[in-house]
Image (cartoon, helix red, strand yellow):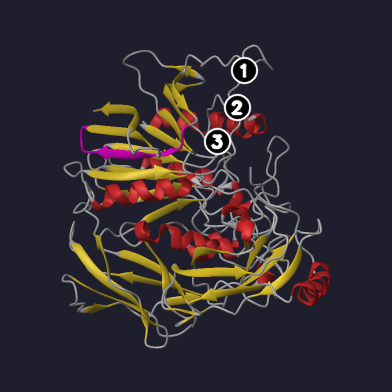
């Protein structure tokens, strides 16, 4: 079995490696070599072929490391040569590379002596346009006739979106985009603020397309004269708001990134399948319908490794350039030792890897209030925390489980006001979402304090205002409850929300189910638990004025694993 990662390789391996290389050359007359082709890539995610030869005494643990920038001693990932025809000391890998505004390089490592050493360094690989506008992601505003677009490029000024009703005829232009970035000084702790983990995020652009007709396809490009322009994309505008409308959308949490190489963190291979199936549904069954994605926290799992954000946005690009990509904050975006809300019953820790929300705040822009009570040590304006919007027959309300959510807090007051303001004649369905769940039968014991305080604080509001369903993440499984109140299924005919955990979109760490009796291998499903599974997948919702249908779609074959129908 190939290990997920190995000890970080130090600079001393370089010096020893070149000594070994010299000795090998003198003895065998053949110099180990590694090269990458083509040396100039025309677009992001284009393949490069990495070829090596003349590796003496090959072993299954020889490897190639991937560096970006090419002269950076610390690598972003690696591949083991045992996955190829390594026995002959030669072989090749084909890898897609993401344009992160830097060049790439590759280094060949030998383990013939029992110590990994560098024996060859490749040529550099660059992009034809390092400033290329990339990572487009649509987001809703509070106005159904608008659509926000954010993207990244290599320069600051003059970026816009061109859009129109016909492909190739983009007659409208947005105002010049608001543009920002963030620096390593705006990250609050290690490992995020260490030089070996920092990569500049480029310039982040934010523009709004206005005057959109309902449920209409628009074509668009984004960029500038300085950066160039993206390829043409299209989206279906919001249908507006009303009980006479319908809406299909996708919901999941805890997805992360599936890399084509190993990184020095746990990886999320199921993420690629989740993206594949969501994209497939959008291209087939929902090709001409408005839709959106709701990602309920734990977005990229960068956790201080800055390059991961670029790879995440490139991974979701086929989805996020077609439908709005709406997010909530999770522990792996925000939690850090100095966060202001840290009660004794919580388990807020160092889960963001020192990012303290900065990349999350900067790279997304959800409709929401000004978070006036929040202190942020990074001097980045907090956003995308608690907010709401409406689309079709649904009112969406979001909570930040990482900030103060207790009665009397700014967040609590916003949620009370929001729930009280819902017009059920316009939006008959009220959907509540947040990262950490109120209920789970998974052995997630460190979260019990937060779960209990969420129940105590918000279940009375759910009953008072008639919340229909709650979606959660954080636990990397799927679980659906009965309509619940106070840890009990309500009686037939009584109203209470169903709770669904959809944290199974990618992260491969899974807690076991709670055992009965404790510490046994016998896992009794609680009476309030209607269905649960450790299979990876995502949720799909289809709603109109009278029916709310939810399907759990499995990543393996794209088939339905669980189904719920609510009616009015």
- Residue at (42, 39) in percent of width and height: 537
Lower sequence index among marks 2 and 3: 3
Residue 562 lies, in percent from the top left, at 36, 28
The answer to whether residue 395 is magenta is no
- The answer to whether residue 140 of the structure is visible from this angle is no
Please name the residue that numbered disc 2 is placed on. Answer: 512
Task: Classify residue 517 as left or right of residue 20.
Answer: left
Q: Secondary structure at mark 1?
A: loop
Please name the residue that numbered disc 3 is placed on. Answer: 475
Task: Tell me whether the residue at label 1 lies in contact with that at label 2, contact meaning CB atoms closer than 8 angstroms.
Answer: yes
Please name the residue that numbered disc 1 is placed on. Answer: 515
As drawn, 390 above or below 490: below
Which mark is drawn over residue 91? none
Cα–Cα span, label 1 and label 2: 8 Å
Q: Secondary structure at mark 2?
A: loop
- Residue at (64, 53) in percent of width and height: 352
The answer to whether residue 545 is magenta is yes
- Residue at (65, 31) in percent of width and height: 449
Q: Which residues are magenta?
A: 535-546
């Amino acid at each position: 079995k190939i290990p997920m990662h190995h000890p970080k390789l130090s600079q001393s391996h370089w010096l020893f490696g070149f000594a070994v290389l010299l000795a090998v050359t003198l003895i065998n007359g053949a110099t180990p070599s590694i090269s990458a082709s083509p040396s100039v890539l025309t677009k992001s995610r284009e393949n490069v072929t990495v070829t090596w030869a003349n590796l003496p005494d090959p072993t299954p643990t020889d490897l190639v490391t991937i560096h970006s920038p090419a002269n950076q001693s610390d690598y972003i990932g690696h591949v083991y040569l045992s996955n190829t025809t390594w026995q002959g000391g030669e072989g090749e890998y084909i890898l897609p590379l993401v344009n992160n505004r830097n060049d790439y390089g590759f280094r060949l490592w030998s383990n013939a002596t029992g110590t990994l050493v560098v024996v060859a360094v490749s040529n550099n690989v660059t992009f034809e346009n390092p400033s290329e506008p990339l990572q487009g992601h649509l987001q809703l505003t509070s106005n159904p006739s608008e659509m926000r677009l954010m993207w990244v490029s290599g320069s600051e000024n003059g970026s816009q979106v061109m859009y129109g009703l016909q492909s190739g005829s983009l007659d409208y232009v947005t105002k010049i985009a608001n543009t920002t970035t963030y620096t390593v000084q705006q990250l609050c702790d290690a490992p995020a603020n260490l030089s070996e983990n920092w990569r500049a995020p480029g310039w982040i652009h934010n523009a709004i397309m206005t005057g959109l007709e309902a449920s209409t396809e628009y074509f668009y490009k984004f960029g500038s004269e300085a950066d160039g322009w993206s390829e043409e994309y299209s989206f279906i505008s919001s249908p507006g708001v009303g009980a006479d409308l319908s809406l299909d959308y996708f919901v999941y949490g805890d997805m992360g990134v599936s890399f084509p190489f190993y990184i020095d963190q746990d990886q999320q291979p199921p993420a690629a399948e989740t993206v594949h199936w969501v994209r497939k549904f959008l291209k087939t069954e929902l090709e001409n319908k408005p839709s959106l994605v709701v990602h309920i926290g734990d977005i990229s799992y960068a956790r201080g490794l800055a390059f991961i954000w670029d790879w995440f946005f490139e991974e979701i690009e086929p989805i996020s350039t077609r439908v709005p990509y709406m997010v909530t904050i999770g522990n792996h975006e925000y939690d850090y030792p100095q966060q202001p809300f840290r009660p004794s019953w919580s388990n807020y820790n160092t889960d963001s890897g020192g990012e303290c929300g900065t990349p999350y705040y900067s790279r997304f822009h959800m409709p929401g209030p000004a978070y006036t009570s929040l202190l942020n040590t990074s001097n980045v304006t907090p956003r995308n925390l608690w907010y709401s919007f409406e689309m079709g027959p649904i009112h969406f309300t979001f909570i930040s489980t990482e900030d103060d959510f207790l009665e009397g807090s700014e967040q609590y007051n916003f949620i009370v006001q929001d729930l009280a303001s819902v017009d059920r004649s316009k939006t008959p369905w009220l959907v509540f979402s947040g990262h950490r769940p109120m209920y789970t039968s998974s052995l997630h014991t460190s979260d019990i304090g937060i779960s209990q305080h969420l129940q105590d604080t918000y279940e009375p509001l759910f009953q008072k205002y008639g919340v229909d369903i709650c979606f959660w993440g954080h636990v990397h499984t799927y679980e659906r409850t009965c309509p619940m109140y106070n840890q009990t299924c309500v009686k037939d005919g009584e109203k209470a929300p169903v709770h669904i955990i959809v944290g199974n979109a990618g992260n491969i760490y899974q807690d076991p189910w709670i055992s009965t009796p404790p510490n046994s291998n016998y896992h009794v499903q609680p009476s309030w638990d209607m269905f649960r599974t450790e299979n990876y997948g995502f949720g799909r919702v289809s709603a109109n004025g009278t029916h709310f249908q939810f399907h759990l779609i499995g990543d393996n074959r794209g088939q339905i694993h669980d189904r719920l129908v609510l009616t009015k």
